Amino acid sequence: MNITIIGTGYVGLVTGACLADIGNNVLCADVDSRKIDMLKAGGIPIYEPGLSDVVESNAAARRLDFTTDIEASVAHGDVQFIAVGTPPDEDGSADLQYVLAAARNIGRYMEGFKVVVDKSTVPVGTADKVAAAIQEELDTRGRADLRFSVISNPEFLKEGAAVEDFMRPDRIVIGYKDDEPGREALGWMRKLYAPFNRNHERTRVMDVRSAEFTKYAANAMLATRISFMNELANLADRVGADIESVRQGIGSDPRIGYSFLYAGTGYGGSCFPKDIQALTRIARDNGQNLRVLESVEAVNEDQKRVLTNKVLARFGDKLEGRTFALWGLAFKPNTDDMREAPSRVIIDALLRAGAKVVAHDPIAVEETQRVLALDFADAPGLLERMSYSSAKDPLEVLANADALIIVTEWKAYRSPNLERLKALMKTPVIFDGRNLYEPGSMKDSGVVYQGIGRNSA
Ligand code: NAD
């Protein structure tokens, strides 16, 4: 099948590479010529485990190519995936300008039947707007005879495991319009995804609006579990309970399950924060307040400050002359994505309170330098107290540190050599935002240890 992917970011590149890998001819388009030049030269603009191999082998087999030529990209694909960004607008609603620009380009250049697939996360009703934008262009061209249908096919991949998630999806949600072009488009989608359904049927076919809603509902449920546990963890700290024991105690109930019950420094990334905001905004626009989700967001904002509050409670408000080692910058392991990463809030508080920060991350250092330059545009001098390492040995950043702050649970942080850690640090104090260690064994080793909700304050 000839497939075009519009928007070659995290979702677009993974989707394009994986669809090429199962034998389709895929053309990935983007307006960012630096990204496309890099991909054409054999580079990968993002870090995602396994992705470079899939991109490389399919590009070599000529099933995967990249372009900035929008007209050529519209001509190429019978199926046109829209996978552009949908960042939050000032009022929290999803900004649809990129989605609608992509739609208009399709209308401007298409010459035959097109299946237009919304892969981006978009508010309920967006498929109608996409269809209207395409139709408007066709009418302007006097080509109202050309047929198309808009499908909603939200993406559920997780950064850090994106290739694996795409290749072995829990479910494939397809929303279609039950008319003649819609049924034809559904036929194309079933054929495209058939290789993913060999073991068992994973496709959930529904109407377009329900498909659009499903994506927001899934992220809202996951974010709710996180904020729920974070709030209980903070209470556990006050009443002397251990949230890890509580997690295991409730996770064993099959109605609850173990997933997404870890207390931590709050959720970040490119999806949860913006999708929760967008869904609450959609509700407000429709005369309803989603009170649970409004609290989920407020709890998460506070949670990003829990670690620094613990630091300030121990060392005081003025941190001049103090050095803090920080493990983990990316919003989660196995990615270099720094969008809404809790580490940014923590670094901001520490630098503005006068501290030095020595940060380690295996992958995200370069991206961190880029985003911090923007975060500190008002006070670039503060960044002189920030240094970075991506060394194989994360203990290297501990020399003379007053405390270690753990923000992201990279594998390399799981079992540090505590004797070396104590020898390197000025004082062996750990603030663990990911609850990686057992408070009891840390105490036995002579390390002052504070997790989140671990009765260890
Ligand atoms: P991204 O920012 O990494 O990539 C978007 C790309 O689209 C950019 O490269 C940009 O240059 C390009 N673009 C913008 N306008 C364009 C146009 N008119 N024509 C061609 N290219 C254009 O974004 P992402 O993280 O891949 O997210 C894309 C969508 O998928 C969003 O709606 C997001 O919510 C959703 N999503 C993301 C994830 C994730 O983990 N990142 C998971 C599921 C769903």
Image: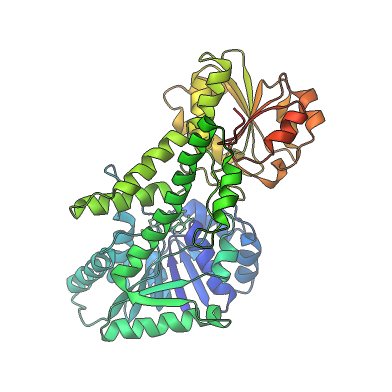
Which colour scheme appears in the figure? rainbow
Q: Determine whether, in the image, residue 111 is placed left or right of residue 9.
A: left
Q: Looking at the picture, how far across and down is residue 249, in whole percent?
A: 58, 51
Counting the numbered discs, the total is: 0
Q: Determine whether, in the image, residue 239 is placed left or right of residue 43.
A: left
Quadrant where the C terminus lies?
Answer: top right
Q: Determine whether, in the image, residue 405 is placed left or right of residue 419.
A: left
Q: Looking at the picture, how far across and down is residue 205, in whole percent?
A: 38, 78
Position of 221 relative to 16 (above/below): above
Residue 378: quadrant of the picture: top left
Residue at 48% across, 56% down? 9
Residue at 49% across, 20% down? 352
Q: Determine whether, in the image, residue 101 is placed left or right of residue 363.
A: left
Residue at 46% across, 72% down? 172
Residue at 56% across, 48% down? 247
Which residue is at the front of the view, 6 or 91? 91
Which residue is at the front of the view, 395 or 235? 235
Q: In terms of image quarters, where does ligand 1 lie?
A: bottom left
Q: Looking at the picture, how far across and down is residue 126, in whole percent?
A: 27, 63
Residue 453: quadrant of the picture: top right
Question: Is residue 174 in sight in this rendering?
Answer: yes
Question: Is residue 46 in sight in this rendering?
Answer: no
Which residue is at the front of the view, 115 or 36? 115
Which residue is at the front of the view, 92 or 40? 92
Q: Looking at the picture, how far across and down is residue 381, in whole percent?
A: 51, 20
